[in-house]
Amino acid sequence: MAPSVAPALPEHRAWMGLALEAAARTRASADVPIGAVVVGPDGGMLGTGWNQREELGDPTAHAEVQAIRAASARLGAWRLEGCTLVVTLEPCAMCAGASVLARIPRVVFGAWDEKAGASGSVFDVLRERRLNHWTEVFAGVREEECAALLKEFFATQRSGSDSR
């Protein structure tokens, strides 16, 4: 399916719980339930984000971008060296690129995105050797929970019902 990834660490499961909580914040909108957090070198949460493309009418308002913006604002710096980005779905090309540009050394994600993933499935922006920064990838953390959230959302969308 994808290139080999580093084995998940125990703290990744807890951090993914925070990203899942962030994803739940999309229930009030028509946004795809994806959540992300940026965790600092000390393990403290620096930024949280969830998809807000529909809510804000902004095509760049992906969960990862929102979390990176919040962490950068909190630190007062664009370089997020030593941080970890945790997201419920494999980052797309834009989000993988944003994490590279922010110098984030680790990305942890839950479900693979076989259609638009850019962190090992369709593309591998995070480990592209021609770029100036490379990222360690931890994939499949709480994968079933992350995938179930998305499957439920899209099933509801297809049925035309709204259980939110």
Image: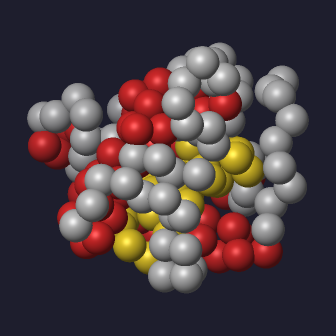
Q: Say if residue 28 shows up in the picture.
A: yes
Front residue of this view, candidates 8 and 100: 100
Residue at the image position 53 percent from the left and 30 percent from the top = 132
Q: Where is residue 80 in the image (x, y as percent from the top left)?
A: 42, 58
Q: Where is residue 127 in the image (x, y as percent from the top left)?
A: 67, 31
Q: Where is residue 36 in the image (x, y as percent from the top left)?
A: 45, 57
Q: Position of residue 92 (x, y in %)?
A: 49, 29
Residue at the image position 71 percent from the left and 75 percent from the top = 11
Front residue of this view, candidates 65 and 52: 65
Q: How many marks?
A: 0
Front residue of this view, candidates 104 and 149: 104
Residue at the image position 54 percent from the left and 64 percent from the top = 82
Q: Say if residue 95 shows up in the picture.
A: no
Q: What colouring does the structure picture have?
A: secondary structure
- Left or right: residue 41 versus residue 59 is right
The image quadrant where one finds the C terminus is bottom left
The image quadrant where one finds the N terminus is top right
Q: In which quarter of the image is residue 3?
A: top right
Residue at the image position 23 percent from the left and 29 percent from the top = 59
Q: In which quarter of the image is residue 160?
A: top left
- Left or right: residue 130 versus residue 73 is right
In the displayed orientation, state which residue is furthest to the front.
132
**On screen, 85 above or below 155?**
below
- Left or right: residue 135 versus residue 21 is right
